[in-house]
Image (cartoon, grey):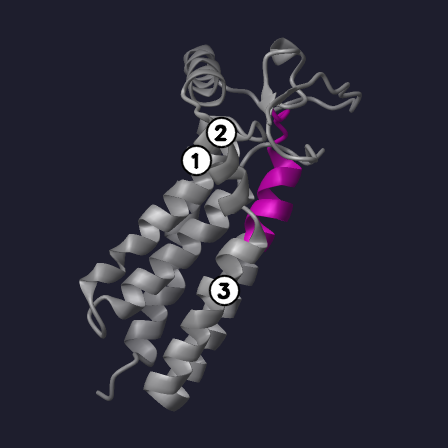
């Protein structure tokens, strides 16, 4: 069920600068996604898919898939995958968020009374970037780049997985679209680098 909220935001800091045309586009896009493009089914679906108990089993499956099929190289793949996840989360949640401060829509006084808030908690950390977007797109890029030639190009579906989880951040009211877009770009870059290193130095198939 959607809850319209006003949450006081008392932090005394200077927020990041965004050009007016980006802010205007962002507010308009957020208003469409969060306030207009919704159905009762999506109100249940998007809060659900962003929960760890939904997406963690898929990543655990990948651990078993890699280690069973590729043995030692599979374990090294898992190590790279974990390092990639830790690196992307640290860069987004600590380095970027601590230096680029942006109020989340669920705290934004300009949106008082208009945000459809579909989760139980609005974080007080910066809205920029979306760590969900960074982390899942980094994982998707790493998975696709390392598995596409070894197994199948059909692994591209992981980008749809990442996109749905990222879109959910806007739908439930905790991020603006620009936060998610930039998070996706950062995630793709962060996932590509270790994937290329892994393919060049190790690879899943015997060279």
Is residue 167 in the magenta section?
Answer: no
Residue 202 placement, left or right of 107: left
Is residue 94 in the magenta section?
Answer: yes
Nearest to the observer: residue 89 or residue 5 = 5
Q: Element at badge 2?
A: helix
Name the residue tied to disc 2: 171
Mark 3–mark 1 distance (CA, rounded to whole Å): 20 Å
Mark 3 or mark 2: name the one nearer the start of the chain: 3
Query: Does 153 sit above or below residue 29?
Result: below
Q: Residues within 10 Å of mark 1 (few under 14, many from 20)?
A: many
Nearest to the observer: residue 53 or residue 156 = 53
Mark 3–mark 2 distance (CA, rounded to whole Å): 23 Å
Tell me where residue 36 sits by quadrant.
top left
Residue 34 placement, left or right of 188: right
Q: Residues within 10 Å of mark 3 (few under 14, many from 20)?
A: few
In the picture, the quarter occupied by the N terminus is top right
Tell me where residue 73 sits by quadrant.
bottom left
Mark 1–mark 2 distance (CA, rounded to whole Å): 6 Å
Q: Is residue 189 visible?
A: yes
Give the main secondary structure, helix, strand or loop, of the magenta stretch: helix
Query: Does 53 sit above or below residue 2?
Result: below
Magenta highlight range: 89-104
Name the residue tied to disc 3: 57
Mark 3 or mark 1: name the one nearer the start of the chain: 3
Q: Position of residue 6 (x, y in %)?
A: 71, 16
Q: Is residue 192 visible?
A: no
Q: Position of residue 58 (x, y in %)?
A: 44, 63
Disc 1 + disc 2, Cβ < 8 Å: yes
Q: Element at badge 1?
A: helix
Residue 121 placement, left or right of 145: right
What residue appears at the point 34 percent right and 55 percent down from the top-left corner?
Answer: 158
Name the residue tied to disc 1: 167
């Amino acid at each position: 069920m959607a809850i319209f909220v006003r949450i006081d935001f008392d932090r005394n800091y200077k927020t990041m600068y965004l050009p007016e045309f980006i802010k205007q586009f962002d507010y308009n896009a957020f208003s469409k996604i969060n306030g207009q493009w919704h159905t009762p089914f999506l109100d249940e679906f998007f809060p659900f898919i962003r929960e760890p108990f939904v997406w963690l089993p898929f990543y655990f499956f990948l651990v078993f898939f890699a280690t069973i099929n590729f043995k030692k190289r599979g374990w090294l793949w898992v190590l790279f995958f974990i390092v990639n996840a830790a690196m992307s989360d640290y860069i987004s949640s600590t380095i970027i968020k601590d230096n680029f401060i942006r109020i989340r829509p669920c705290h934004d006084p300009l949106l008082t009374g208009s945000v459809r808030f579909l989760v139980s908690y609005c974080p007080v950390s910066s809205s920029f970037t979306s760590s969900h977007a960074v982390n899942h797109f980094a994982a998707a890029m790493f998975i696709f780049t390392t598995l596409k030639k070894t197994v199948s190009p059909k692994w591209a579906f992981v980008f749809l997985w990442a996109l749905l989880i990222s879109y959910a951040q806007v739908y439930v009211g905790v991020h603006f679209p620009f936060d998610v877009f930039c998070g996706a770009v950062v995630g793709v870059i962060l996932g590509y680098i270790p994937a290329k290193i892994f393919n060049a130095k190790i690879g899943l198939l015997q060279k």
